[in-house]
Amino acid sequence: MECAGKALKLLSLSVALLITATGCSTAAQRVQTEPTLPPVKIYNGGRVFFVSPEGDDDNTGLSSKYPLKHIQSALELAQPGDTIVLMPGTYRENIKTVRDGLPGKPITVVGTPGSLIVGNDKPKGRIIDVRNSYIQLLHLNINGQFADCTEENCYHDKLIYIHGSPEKMLSGIRVEAVNLKNALGECLRIKYSENSEIAWNSISHCGLRDFVFGRGKQNGEGIYVGTAPEQTHGHPDHTKNILIRYNTIATYGAECVDVKEGATKIVIENNVCLKSMQKTSGGISVRGNREVIRYNIVFDNKGAGIRLGGDTKEFGIENEVTYNFLDNNLKAALKIMRTPQDKMCSNRSTDTEKLYYPKEKRFMGAFEPCNR
């Protein structure tokens, strides 16, 4: 029995080594390292501040009978575990977070039906500037068109801007059930951040500066993750462990989701992506390594459906692309610019003549079942 036990252990070890050598365990190992976040709670046991455009900043804000006037005033007061409720009305202010929440005690801003944030009357700004960890933005309605006109100076640049720094990565950011539309640049940007989630949002009409007003560049992502290497000034952006899921994104501008070099372990799943006008890219573009792209519906984009590859050969590799439905993406269903890639299988495309750009037989398995 002892010999049999030793033989079984040796056999198990040999199988494990074989699996590791062939790369078959990669997906299983990745599942264990994908980000997991606690459920979102609107009320976390702290105080509740009410805000209304008809309120008064001399009020306590601790009852809907006596609301504060400005969201920023509530943010100045809010401590970890507190919630800020936006009552119906139009909020004409740009806001900036003040302090960190804590794990299990985030600072939460939640909208109600009829509440709308359009920012202040100074064009090209950032409507919500998140500079702290453990912040939740829930059920907000944000429109970057702050004036009743259609010129470039009638819009803000970014609607939600989440940015840590090389010295202080942000963590625990949740943006959920938010409606974002009309941005000159990116609708939502997240950089120098980790362990955060962007989910259940509706995002549209990003990149007006380039795609409507004709500046001539290609800026205007729905969700922009990380920082392009040429903009890091020697401090690479290692944004990681971000969940991007259950969003509907129609940018009419650049990519629905754009993940830059240096970002890792970004999970892009269960999103609907359409109306990217950027012919040289894709509806979903990944330049980082070890990302997961799965269960998305990507259609009606001017470029590829999904694009993989960074500016240099060490980026945009080892990504998983599985169970995506790709339709009517004008350049190709998949555009794979760098190798090696990880598991690519069980994707479907209605455009059988445009599966790949460029055409490479080594990726033919991307449209075959994963269990073959």
Image (cartoon, rainbow, N blue to C red):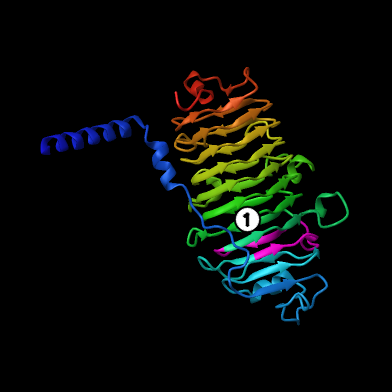
| Residue 50 vertical placement versus 321 (above, below) | below
Q: Which span of residues is magenta-colored?
A: 109-134
State which quadrant residue 53 falls in: bottom right
State which quadrant residue 340 falls in: top left
| Residue 198 vertical placement versus 67 (above, below) | above
Give the residue drawn at x 76%, y 65%: 93
Q: Amino acid at mark 1?
A: Val
> If the image is split into quadrants, where does the N terminus sit?
top left
Q: Is residue 221 visible?
A: no
Q: Residue 104, image x and y in percent?
A: 52, 66
> If the image is split into quadrants, where does the C terminus sit?
top left
Q: Residue 134, image x and y in percent?
A: 55, 63
Q: Residue 364, image x and y in percent?
A: 51, 21
Depth order, front residue of 30/371: 371
Depth order, front residue of 43/222: 43
Depth order, front residue of 269/130: 269
Give the residue drawn at x 14%, y 34%: 4
Left or right: residue 149 versus residue 302 is right
Q: Is residue 179 visible?
A: yes
The local secondary structure at tag 1 comes to: strand
Q: Residue 13, image x and y in percent?
A: 23, 36
State which quadrant residue 161 falls in: bottom right
Q: Is residue 111 magenta?
A: yes
| Residue 79 vertical placement versus 109 (above, below) | below
The residue furthest front is 1
